[in-house]
Image (cartoon, rainbow, N blue to C red):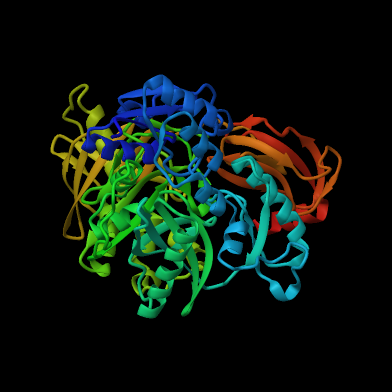
Amino acid sequence: MINAILVANRGEIACRIFRTCRDLGITTVAVYSDADADALHVREADSAVRLPGAAPADTYLRGDLVVKAAQAAGADAVHPGYGFLSENADFARAVIDAGLTWIGPPPDAIESMASKTRAKELMGIAPLGLDDVTEDDLPVLVKAAAGGGGRGMRVVRELSALKGELEAARAEAASAFGDGEVFVEPYLEGGRHVEVQVMADVYDTVWALGTRDCTLQRRHQKVIEESPAPGLAAGLVDELHAQALRAARVTGYRGAGTVEFLVDGDRAHFLEMNTRLQVEHPVTEAVFGIDLVALQIQVAEGGRLAQEAPVARGHAVEARLYAEDPAARWAPQTGTLHRLSVPGVRLDTGYADGDTIGVHYDPMLAKAVSYAPTRAGAVRALAGALERAVVHGPVTNRELLVRSLRHPEFTGARMDTGFYDRHLGELTDPAPDPHAPLAAALADAHGRSRFGGWRNLASQPQVKLLRSESDGAEHEVRYRHTREGFSAEGVRVLSVSGELVVLEVDGVRRQFEVRRYGDDRVYVGNTALTSLPLLPEPTTRQEPGSLLAPMPGTVVRLAEGLAQGVRVTAGQPLIWLEAMKMEHRITAPASGTLTALHAEPGRQVEVGALLAVVDVDAADAVQEEQSV
């Protein structure tokens, strides 16, 4: 029997595994980097071991340090979670060689599926040769042979771009997984991403646990997942199950794994097998009424699965809440998460109120999961929960999730992998509440009015200036405060306190919850506002053509030959910045000459840091000025 488990991971998945361990009476051990010293998964574990450093390569990817941590803490088993070392056969062998129980598939099974190219060969599929791609093959997807999570993936639509995208994918894959091998496969426009959860024991019992649809993705990373995948013909589901069972059996698989496919009409194309637990596993748990982590532990202890897989009932949907700005090319966000609450649904998270979202790891804050007897009911429940959610802190994709779940293509199960390419503009169009600034101003005035009394003089209009974070608009709010209370044009003020303002708007009573953080940040519901001085201070003007870091991160590489004095063209990628497990390109704003270069590989930069300056050509400068 397993008595103590070290989770070789961090954040949300570590907390989720600890929850099952507590239910089973198993002691928990966390590992943490210096950046995670006060993280929630560390606080929730029974004990924790430090991995000195902050970068993943120095900490969570150091299998030798993780094994030593397990031994030092007295753990007798290791659960890898997902990501980092979860699909590393050498790490699995090191755990077993140290006399610890490995809660995962056999190392040989991991190795057989670790490379996506070898996995395809094992399934009888020949990948497209890197030197064999022609115009007729386009579009193609450049993909890292190791790892996952969208790292090292590039869509290529023009043959001339293939070489550069191969180099970029190799560099990103080597940085993320320590393996720069890439391959090319056809990219199917309009396909759906569907997967099958498998579970196997040491007695050759293998379950195929339904299907999951993970079609809604950004940057090749999943955003919304559901089970079962809607609208699939019974024959296609049978085929998906058969291929998944085959993949598990040919590898001698044990434990939990996922076989992924791209579905095009009634055809299924094998993509890969992930030899680990998936981020979206809660939807399968909800539909089948099981705990996949408990089953992983059961199998690792030598326990048997039932001969027949459990029966699916109902429908479940999961949405990933990210600290990112979808309207700014999905740029990850950092800062303090003041408050996080999503009522009425399962919430798996690695953060609590007051925690800091840093730059070193994935920007996912939480997974919200709904369940209902029908798909329509589950989708409605999740959209409603996210609409009522309170998320105060960095910008998130919360509103995008609500709109995605209510989009007719999604509700009608007509979505495909191009969903966000087509609809991102409408899904991110700001729609701030027009009465939020007034509510913020009244709540602020109520707090200040406690100091001192009111005289028998007619009240003069009060003015407060606020800027909305969602669209950058500035709002000049005017109201009056007399002995009888507050008044404002166009609405009836029913009551005001420092945290709740009640207004009557066009005969409808509306309540506005107000929260302040610091001296100038205020939230009305989820509308973020910043108090501005009525007489703003002069600001420093940036030199035209300045390239600023859009987020805090690390410079990973520069364009070949980039140096002060070289010519660049509009849109040319110049600098690659890595932040929160994503790589971001900084491109030339216009054609011109590079007159300054402050970026260098390995340098960490803060948001707004000056990376380079392009002296824009005169013709481009005139055109740019005329377009403003």
Which is more toward the observer, 340 or 365? 365
- Residue 542 visible: no
Residue 465 sits in quarter:
top left
Q: Quadrant of residue 162?
A: bottom right
Q: Position of residue 527 (x, y in %)?
A: 35, 46
Left or right, residue 372 beside residue 282: left
Picture residue at 51% right of the left edge, 44% below the top: 107
Can residue 55 be seen in this snapshot?
yes
Pick whichever, 325 or 509, lies toward us: 325
Residue at left 45%, top 59%? 248
Query: Which quadrant is the N terminus positioned in?
Result: top left
Which quarter of the figure is the C terminus placed in? bottom right
Q: Position of residue 409 (x, y in %)?
A: 40, 72
**Which residue occupies the foreground of this view, 10 or 567?**
10
Q: Is residue 468 above or below residue 198?
A: above
Residue 265 place in picture, x, y as percent:
48, 79
Query: Which residue is nearer to you in this view: 84 or 510?
Result: 84
Q: Residue at x 33, y 46 (%)?
A: 299
Answer left or right for 253 relative to 388. Answer: right
Q: Looking at this view, name the residue that lies furthest to the front.
A: 203
Q: Is residue 468 above or below residue 570?
A: above
Would you say 322 lies left or right of 573 here? left
Compared to residue 147, the image places residue 350 above or below, namely above
Q: Position of residue 137 (x, y in %)?
A: 70, 73
Q: Residue at image x 28%, y 51%?
A: 304
Q: In the rendered view, does 306 fall on the left or right side of 78?
A: left
Q: How many marks?
A: 0
